Amino acid sequence: MPEGHSVHRIARQFALHFVGHKVAVSSPQGRFAEGAARIDGLEMTDARAVGKQMFLEFDHSLWLCVHLGLYGAWDFAGDITADATTASSNGRMGQTNQRGTILDRDAAEDSAASIGAPRRTRLRMSEQEKLETPIESFPPEPIGAVRVRLLTDDAVADLRGPTKCIVQTPDEVDAAIGKLGPDPLVDDSKAAEERFVSTVLKKSTPIALLLMDQNVISGIGNVYRAEMLFRARLNPHTPGKDLSVKTVRALWHDWGYLLGVGVKTGQMLTMDDLDDESYRKALAHRDDRHWVYHRTGLPCRVCGTHILMEELGGRKLYWCPKDQA
């Protein structure tokens, strides 16, 4: 499932290429025909991500709300931009399995060198991002079961396989966002931090489950959960109420930091202070990118103890039994 940084990156594509444009909306698959008709021909006025959910605003006070879930993906095509992380990886990038490297360490998404001129191509954005072959004509024919198609004069976005795809009013959007935990890229205020801290400190639930609870904090998935707990040297089974205020605040700030890195690089890069060669390897291969995630049975990078994997809350949890004792 895409974690928070992926959804923020998708929202940026919409902000670049759709906001300010009238959009033809259809449902090639047919399952979203009624919803598509409500926003067809309207101008997109905003694109925002909150955690793992995305909200696209249209005039007439209507919003298209999308949660990709396990299988959802957006396919962009037309005169769209692709940042340097995509271009330098020979067309494939994402949270896992990226091939290639970033050649310039400063070529982050919002640097001057990272956004190329728009070109007529296809870009798939979900848990992973994949730059596909250039398109021959525009708009391209829909591929697969496209739930909704958003089309402007120069760009098209096709949505497939989402968990949620619904048109909502402003009040409904406010209610949906109100149920979500804070997202530090949306609100990094002291109030948002205090909301997270106070919620965690009231809970007897293990911190490993709290970090995955989207009502507690938005955007963290299985990879970031494991990596944040290791970075904090926290036993994942520790109840939230047993943590110190300082520790919980540190988790909030670390999530904001890692989320920013993920948005810039397109990778869940969780290892700091890497030399240039290690940095290139980390961006090129998941095996060189994480402290504990997906490293069952391998030696801890710090102490050498074998990394454990267990099931917790229906998801795989990776941790070091010594450094996180």
Image (cartoon, rainbow, N blue to C red):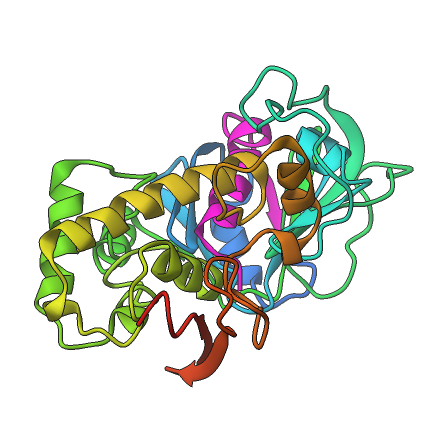
Residue at position x 27%, y 53% in the image:
177
In x, y percent, where is residue 130?
A: 73, 48
Is 203 colored magenta in this rendering?
Answer: no
Which residue is more in the foreground, 272 or 111?
A: 272
Which residue is more in the foreground, 29 or 275?
A: 275
Measured along the vertical axis of the image, is residue 1 above or below residue 8? below
Image-based side of 2 in relation to 233, left or right: right
Q: Quadrant of the C terminus?
A: bottom left
Residue 74 visible in the snapshot: no
In x, y percent, where is residue 194?
A: 11, 48
Image-based side of 214 in relation to 109, left or right: left
Q: Residue furthest right?
A: 136
- Report how many numbered discs are placed on residues in the image: 0
Residue 92 visible in the snapshot: yes
Residue at position x 13%, y 38% in the image:
190
Is 15 colored magenta in this rendering?
Answer: yes
Residue at position x 63%, y 52% in the image:
288
Residue at position x 64%, y 23% in the image:
114
Image-based side of 316 in relation to 13, left or right: left
Q: Which residues are magenta?
A: 1-26
Image-based side of 155 in relation to 43, left or right: right
Measured along the vertical axis of the image, is residue 103 above or below residue 284? above
Which residue is more in the foreground, 182 or 23?
A: 182
Q: Residue furthest top?
A: 112
Measured along the vertical axis of the image, is residue 13 above or below residue 250? above
In x, y percent, where is residue 173?
A: 29, 52
In x, y percent, where is residue 265?
A: 57, 37
